[in-house]
Structure formats: C-alpha cells, structure tokens
Image (cartoon, grey):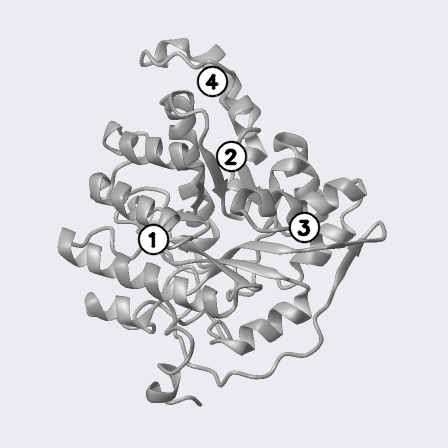
Amino acid sequence: MSTRREFTKDAADIVFTGCSVADAAQAQPQAGGRRRQVVVGGRRVKTIDVHAHCVVPAAMAVMGKTPGANEMRGPGISEVGLRRIREMDEQGIDVEAISINPFWYQAERDVAAEVVKINNETLTKWCAAHPDRFVGFASVALQFPDLAVQQLEHAITKLGMCGVAVGASVAGYEFSDAKFHPFWAKAEELGTLIFIHPQSTPDLAKRFKGNGWLANTIGNPLDTTIALSHLIFEGTLDRFPGLKICSAHGGGFLPSYAPRSDNCLRVAPDMDTGVKLKKKPTEYLRQMYYDTLVFTSEALRHLAAEVGASQLVIGTDHPIPWQDKSVDHILNAPGFTDDERRAMLGETAAKLLGIRPL
C-alpha cells in the first residue's frame, strides 16, 4: 500500500474514484502489460473513453472532505496511476478523458474558486505526464456563472484541457435558467465539449431509500433525462445551436422513450409556456452526443436508432465496474457497419476532444 508521502510524489495527486467520491484506497502502481490493439475492418482504431472519474484529494481537503467521505460504492473502485494504465491496456482503451464530478456547487465563491483551481491545475499536470493516454475535462464553479466563464476560458485556452464536465443541475437550478446563458455562450464560442454527468435526483432521495441502489440505478439516468429535457423544451439549444453536449449513461432515459417528447406538444398544447421550438424535440437529440454505457446490444442498437451511431462514444464509467468490456460491447453488437464501429470506438470522440487520430 502506498503511503501518503509516496502518493504525493506521483505525477499528479489524483485518485481514480467513482461517480460520487468513494472508499478510495491508494493502490500501489503496477507496470502495464502489452496494450490490446483494436482493429475494425483491417484498420487500427484509437479508442477513446469519455467517461472516467477521479478526484484530487488536495481539492477535497479545501472543503474538509476526503476521498473516502461519501457512501461505499462497492469493491475495487479506486485505483491510482499506472494501475489504471494497465487496466486500460487490458480493456483496449487507448485514451481516457478524465472528469471530476462536482462536489463544490454549494460552496462559497472563494472556496469554489480554490477547489476548481486545484482540480484543473492538478489534472492538467497528470495528463501532461501521460500525454498519449489521458486528457482532462475542466471543472467550473457553475453556481457563479460569471466565475465559471472565466474558469472555462482559462482551462481551455491556457491549460489546454479537452472540455468541461458539469453536473445535471446546479444547486437546485436547471441549466435552462437564464443565469447560465453566459456560460453556454462561452462554451459555444470556444467550441468546447460539455460532458454532463448526473448527481442523482436529490428531490427524490426519500423514495430512493431501500434496496437496489436506486439513487444511482434510477436517480442518475433520471437526473440526465430532466436536464436534457429542460435544455430542449426551454429553448436553450435553439438559443445556442452550436453547443457540443455529451451525456453520460446513454443520455439517461430520454432516448429510450424519445417520441413521447414530440407527442406531448400535440396532446397538451395548452401546456406551452410560450417557448416556440424550431424543431421537434427528438430532432435535438440527434445533435447531441452520448456515451455507450447502455449494457446490451439491443439497447445500443435502439440508442443508435434514435440519435445516430455518429453521436455515440465509449463510456466506461471507470472505476465503477458497470461495464468493463466497453470495447467488446461495440465490437460485438450486431447491425453496425465498420465505419459506425470505428466512429463509436474513437473517431467521433477524437474530433470532439481535439485528439489526433491514428
């Protein structure tokens, strides 16, 4: 087991941990084996995972938290450093885009600013030490939109981060609220990929109690469903048509029941609040992006049918072992062309994140 002193000597002080901070033991780095190379139709593919988590203990300490602060998420969910690279090699993941789920949305301005600064600088240092394996999503203090705009611009233009990771709402506010328009405008201006990862649905915490880990099993995809629905129905995507948004967990439940969104405008036109959409709700789904964390070949086929295979990218959700065969999930699903498989495995993500393809 690494000691704290040994751990801080690593390229950057990060812990790979789950969607919410978990029981993050610091594992001894191990040397990587031979990297699995993915070939489709005779062509090598650079595989890119857009959905992987870590935390920066120094940033958590600013808020009096530790990597083991939140509920246990199951065994084997925390790795450090070279051990993760070995696992990527085994799974056939060439590049991982790492994000930090926001635990600072309730913090005061100066505290949130310090947390974000440490997160972004530390993650940038880690990625620079492993430039062919990792890129980093920026953190921003969205509860202060003006500050988030500054943080985003600095992270993208100065630190060279690949995009920005956000929750699915901010301290009780939906992203469609006008207070966030300056942030969306800056993200659109910069052409920055926005990775939306849910934080359960706090309003339903009482109903999620009991067996089944419902706060995650249901709460996470529901949180994303609500966030995307507001962005569509409140006209945010019409106001900022150039936004590049990628959602975790296949976009939550929304793509699975997408036509209901179209039909609600026909069945209940009296519920229209004055926002006149330029397209059908389902058409907006086809301009956003989604990870492939949907578990079965049929679910992947249906997601592609609703949003287009060109909009899908690998999502492993590491280190939570939701799907440790994410590459095979795409390779083995029937009905896709070689071009579609290559796009899902890495070509689409490379374009979105500015990663050089093979």
Question: In the rendered structure, which disc, 2 or 1, sits on the residue that comes first in sequence?
Answer: 1
| SS state under label 3 | helix
Q: CA distance from mark 1 to mark 3?
A: 25 Å
Distance between the alpha carbons at the discs numbered 2 and 1? 25 Å
Q: Which mark is residue 254?
A: 2
Disc with the residue nearer the chain's start (3 vs 2): 2
Question: At x 74% / y 64%, what residue is drawn?
Answer: 37
Amino acid beneath label 3: Leu
Q: Are marks 1 and 4 in contact (CB under 8 Å)?
A: no
Residue shown at the point (26%, 37%) measured from the top left: 173
Counting residues from the N terminus, which is met first, the one under dot 2 or under dot 4? 2
The picture quadrant where one finds residue 339 is: top right
Give the residue pinned by disc 3: 345
- Closer to the camera: disc 2 or disc 1? 1
- Name the element at disc 4: helix
Mark closer to the chain start, 1 or 4: 1
Residue tagged by mark 4? 264
